[in-house]
Image: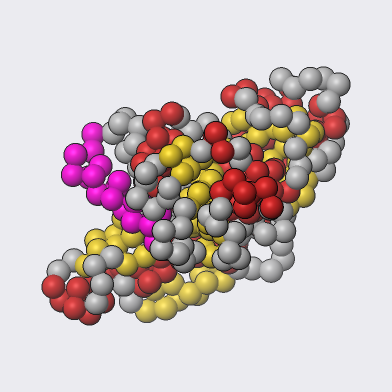
């Protein structure tokens, strides 16, 4: 820390996990906070008068979403429309970029930087984010940070845990599942895989299954997400998952045990296929060593029984050991903050 003080003075360092569903931030001044990655603007003068602000964020925005034009700026771990692959209008693209900028400014503001204080931030991105997508994250941060570095999210998790050799990180978020094998140096392209069968995929599948089996139930994607977060599991259980949902406006109890289990299990085969890819292309002398240190991170890592089910899938490779990070909400942000502390000054990208 003394060396940092000489190099950077009284600068504020931030680790930011800019997630598809949640954004977490940890700061050198001790702040740790998480907000939902949503931004809303009042629809009209009535909603503007009721809310008393021009921009609303996070859970408050979700609470008042019927009165807001709501944008969730990130999709599959990157800024929506940033890869120019859609037919979105220029106005839509501009709105998403503005939402991303406002969200970054909001979370940086939560850290309370002092007037004139330099703010350095490390932002975690999907393992295989394209150059264009990384640039979009840098642009989103340009109004809130003085300097920024964008790194692989699973690499930041590994760095924070000080697990830098013979370890496989599987970071399971809302937008992406990111796998990264660590071998004592910076991961290369072949060391990382990004999947899109993640939390959002599970939410959509759960909603579809419930609607198929309970066609009268009135459900939204937000309700399905809350059910998954509260009851998600991949193991057999005698305890049934009963939830109350509206049917023609009246609450009715339905059993979603099978649907919840099926939806949550759907992410396992793609993960095992990606693990096979990373193991089979690894140095054969070190394959068994890395299998003994598989670490799950991200919000979806907490699905009941997921670690054990992946262990079962690793048996055909000679067996493996799967564990979960203790603080899935902050593992990425904490690692990014540690990287910010250790980052050589020459690697920072000046934004101002």
**Identity of the residue drawn at 71% across and 20% down:** 281
| Dominant secondary structure of the residues highlighted in magenta in the image | helix
Find residue 352 and report its image quarter: top left
**Residue 225, position as x, y percentages in the image:** 48, 60
**Residue 287, position as x, y percentages in the image:** 81, 26
**Identity of the residue drawn at 42% across and 69% down:** 59
Asked whether 250 or 285 is in front, the reply is 285
Find residue 159 and report its image quarter: top right
**Above or below, 122 relative to 188:** below
**Above or below, 155 relative to 229:** above
**Residue 151, position as x, y percentages in the image:** 55, 38
Residue 96 lies in the magenta stretch: yes
In the rendered structure, which segment of residues is drawn in magenta? 87-107
Residue 209 visible? The answer is no
**Identity of the residue drawn at 38% across and 71% down:** 60
Labels in figure, total:
0
Q: Residue furthest left?
A: 45
Residue 351 visible? The answer is yes
User: Left of 68 or right of it: where is 107?
Assistant: right
**Residue 28, position as x, y percentages in the image:** 59, 59
User: Left of 155 or right of it: where is 217?
Assistant: left
């Amino acid at each position: 820390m003394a060396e940092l003080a000489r190099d950077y003075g009284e600068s504020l360092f931030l680790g930011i996990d800019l997630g598809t569903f949640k954004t977490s931030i940890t700061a050198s001044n001790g702040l740790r906070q998480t907000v939902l990655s949503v931004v809303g603007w009042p629809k009209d003068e009535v909603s503007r008068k009721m809310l008393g602000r021009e921009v609303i964020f996070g859970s408050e925005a979700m609470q008042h979403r019927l009165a807001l034009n709501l944008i969730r700026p990130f999709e599959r771990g990157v800024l929506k429309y940033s890869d120019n692959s859609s037919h979105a209008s220029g106005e839509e693209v501009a709105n998403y970029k503005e939402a991303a900028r406002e969200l970054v400014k909001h979370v940086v503001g939560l850290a309370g930087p002092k007037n004139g204080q330099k703010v350095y931030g490390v932002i975690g991105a999907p393992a295989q984010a394209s150059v264009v997508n990384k640039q979009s994250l840098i642009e989103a941060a340009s109004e809130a940070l003085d300097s920024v570095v964008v790194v692989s999210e699973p690499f930041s998790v590994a760095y924070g845990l000080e697990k830098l050799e013979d370890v496989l990180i599987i970071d399971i978020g809302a937008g992406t599942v990111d796998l990264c094998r660590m071998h004592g140096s910076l991961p290369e392209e072949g060391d990382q895989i990004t999947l899109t069968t993640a939390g959002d995929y599970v939410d959509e599948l759960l909603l579809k299954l419930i609607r198929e089996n309970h066609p009268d139930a009135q459900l939204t994607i937000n309700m399905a997400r809350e059910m998954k977060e509260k009851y998600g599991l991949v193991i057999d259980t005698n305890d049934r998952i009963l939830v109350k949902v509206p049917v023609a406006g009246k609450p009715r109890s339905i059993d979603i045990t099978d649907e919840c289990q099926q939806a949550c299990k759907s992410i396992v085969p793609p993960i095992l296929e990606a693990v096979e890819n990373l193991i089979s292309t690894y140095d054969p002398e070190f394959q068994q060593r890395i299998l003994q240190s598989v670490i799950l991170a991200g919000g979806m890592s907490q699905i009941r029984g997921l670690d054990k089910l992946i262990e079962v899938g690793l048996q055909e490779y000679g067996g493996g050991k799967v564990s979960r990070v203790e603080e899935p909400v902050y593992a990425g942000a904490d690692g990014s903050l540690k990287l910010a502390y250790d980052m050589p000054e020459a690697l920072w990208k000046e934004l101002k």
